[in-house]
Image (cartoon, coloured by chain):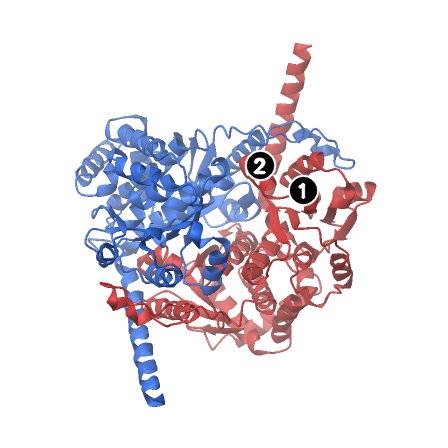
Chain colours: A red, B blue
Amino acid sequence: MKNRLYFDVSRNDTATKKELFEKIKDEKNAIGYYNLPDQDISSLLAYAASFDNDIEYIVVLGIGGSSLGAKAIYEFLKPRNGNKRKLVFFESTDPVSISYITAQIDISKSHFLVISKSGTTIETIAVFKYIYSLQSDPGYYTFITDKDSPLEKFARGINAKVFHIPSNVGGRFSALSAVGLLPLALCGIDIKALLDGAGQIKESFFHDGYIRDILLDKALFYAKHHTVYHINCIFAYSETLKYFCEWYVQLWGESLGKKQRHSSFNVGLTPVGLIGPKDQHSFLQLLMEGTRDKSATFIKIEDFKDPLIISNISLQHLESLDVINNIEFHKLINMQCDATFEALKMQEGIPLDEISIQAVDEHSIGELVYYYELLTSLVGRLIDVDTYNQPSVELGKTILKDKLEKSKAYSLSFNKQLK
Amino acid sequence: MKNRLYFDVSRNDTATKKELFEKIKDEKNAIGYYNLPDQDISSLLAYAASFDNDIEYIVVLGIGGSSLGAKAIYEFLKPRNGNKRKLVFFESTDPVSISYITAQIDISKSHFLVISKSGTTIETIAVFKYIYSLQSDPGYYTFITDKDSPLEKFARGINAKVFHIPSNVGGRFSALSAVGLLPLALCGIDIKALLDGAGQIKESFFHDGYIRDILLDKALFYAKHHTVYHINCIFAYSETLKYFCEWYVQLWGESLGKKQRHSSFNVGLTPVGLIGPKDQHSFLQLLMEGTRDKSATFIKIEDFKDPLIISNISLQHLESLDVINNIEFHKLINMQCDATFEALKMQEGIPLDEISIQAVDEHSIGELVYYYELLTSLVGRLIDVDTYNQPSVELGKTILKDKLEKSKAYSLSFNKQLK
């Protein structure tokens, strides 16, 4: 992975950068995700290897941090993953979607992963109750949850297999824990290569490799200018990175959208995920000519390892487009990336940087995941927020619980009246 | 469709609103999308009816405005559309994605719609050349393009069927033209009901129905405060509206992200599409506690017409969640929508409104499409931009063309040297 910054980096921040690095080194002792690349995955691999070949669908019941990481990585690799098991996600209470997904799978050839850090996520338990009413054999289920959560206790009660999420790993930072690794391993993805990729960025950052200064400079720039450039776009040139963008939106938005620790200010950096060349025909106009409140990070894939070529056909009346004949598609898409980048560089007030990853493989996506986790931690530190909590999502849950209880009380009293 | 605004609407804007309405009435004579609900669709319907039952895949080659509208509507209705023809999209030059999609379809059972307003969209022609090299029988293709475009001339040359995009209908406003209607009709979607839904909003707006004042008030609020609330979120409570959000992002971003006509200011409203309840576990924290630069429109579906119920199962250790037992999923998801909305209402500085549509059907999505097109036109007028152009996407295209020509010249001279 390479990362090149095209905005002005101050040369006077050496002390700030040093201090920031020391703080992150301290954080590494308390916050669990930093060390996930070094975890022992033998029990996960052994469990995955024990699965019957008849299982065709790995079905995740999870939402937010319990689904976005595995989905991002799986969808990136899917076109390259051959005809292995399919990974399917129930991540909504939308009945239309639940019915549709249920119709797409064959329950008898499925294994269900029920994933919830707290163990009491309402969406996940609601779908689980529905699926469990269709198939109550505990052998069809594996649970991934915090140690001693109510969900673990339930799972133990029915003698089902349980994996833990380390208690110091938050949901949106859990892609490289069992939450992401187990579904991926079950679908034939090389989770060792994935962790190796992440580990390479970890090593490079913490042991003075090339990425340390780049990440510190980038974080410092984003933090310094966070009230100006408070929309951060990823512009990724591959359809395969679509769900990576969704994962990034949660990571960035939920980590950095907070009240500051030492003030009452509402701060936050708004993430936007774009896919090229498609979004050249959508968001690009706004990026080029709209308000100067956006930075953009271009992500490109160095080598798609795909020989697909634009056929050497001259179409009558469309001869002006013969210029693309015989060009590989992977060359065209990267030229489109470069051309858009250059067009943006010619504008004032749009901080740009470019990341290139090597290939559509596990190592590359592992690097990208860990890079973005680190960047989030660094910026969170600098803008003085608690990167790892999400206090404001509780209020809606409390209101919902209240609504549910009132509705239940009403329907109970209604049923009583009927009797 | 209902729409309720929860922000303060000024009572002193009667004159401004009247003037705005008159301007839009004038615009209606020049800008084509306004009148699409009234078009004659008999030739589209007859053409769709002429298709063989053996055709299983309708394959769109198009990008941006040539794909997002049909995709938004198709994906909304898909779970309800039964086992009819599948609609598939090639909307990238990503070779991994092109190879993957090609492997998913059976070309002999496919019909290809090549859609490009200008007729020279590089992504679309690139993919077309590839597909055409696999199947060159003109009977497999229908072309949708501007009258007399190079693509039309090519199509006439091979005796293929052509439909036109009215010249005064822009790409991102073309969902209800042949661009959207033909692929949808070919997949069994009731395009008459779709246009009826759009027509109902049109009628209500232009003939003093309930929606006129709401739309004028909303547009005026967004425009007045566009430098403060310059991120506009849709928070739609159904997975089926995911691609509607992508369509909205193009419509809103590309129409409103501009230099003002009568100043040199860069202005723009940044669109963000969110899906509930999933994004309660992602973007919600940022919306609740982040910078006060965002408005949010909640969209809910009144009646999912889906009887799916959360099973009446009490899980040991999870008894606190028995409160959801026996509740319909459609009731739960709408309660989640209401609870999140109420939690946001309790915050300062987040302008909210709520749209409810009746059902997962053609009429409802037709209403929603036309509503958002109108809102875009209104806000564009007020913030003094040309809503219907996209001048800044040309620069990247020019740079790309230059790169392609250089690369061609290089490879030609390289080949010459080899000889």
User: Which residue matches tag 2?
Assistant: A99
Element type where label 1 sits in the image: helix
Is B243 above or below relative to A39? above
Q: Residue at x 25, y 26 (%)?
A: B208
Q: Marks 1 and 2, how far apart in space?
A: 13 Å
Tell me the mark number nearer the camera, choosing from 1 and 2: 1
- x and y, in percent, of residue A138 in the image: 78, 42
Q: Earlier in the sequence, mark 1 or mark 2?
A: 2
Q: Chain of mark 2?
A: A
- x and y, in percent, of residue A194 in the image: 64, 66
Label 2 CA crowd tier, 10 Å (few <14, some 14–19, many 20+): some
Q: Residue at x 43, y 32 (%)?
A: B361
Q: Residue at x 45, y 74 (%)?
A: A10
Could you tell whether A46 is left or right of A74 in the image? right
For the residue marked with disc 1, what is the amino acid? Answer: Ile
Q: Chain of mark 1?
A: A
User: Which residue matches tag 1?
Assistant: A107
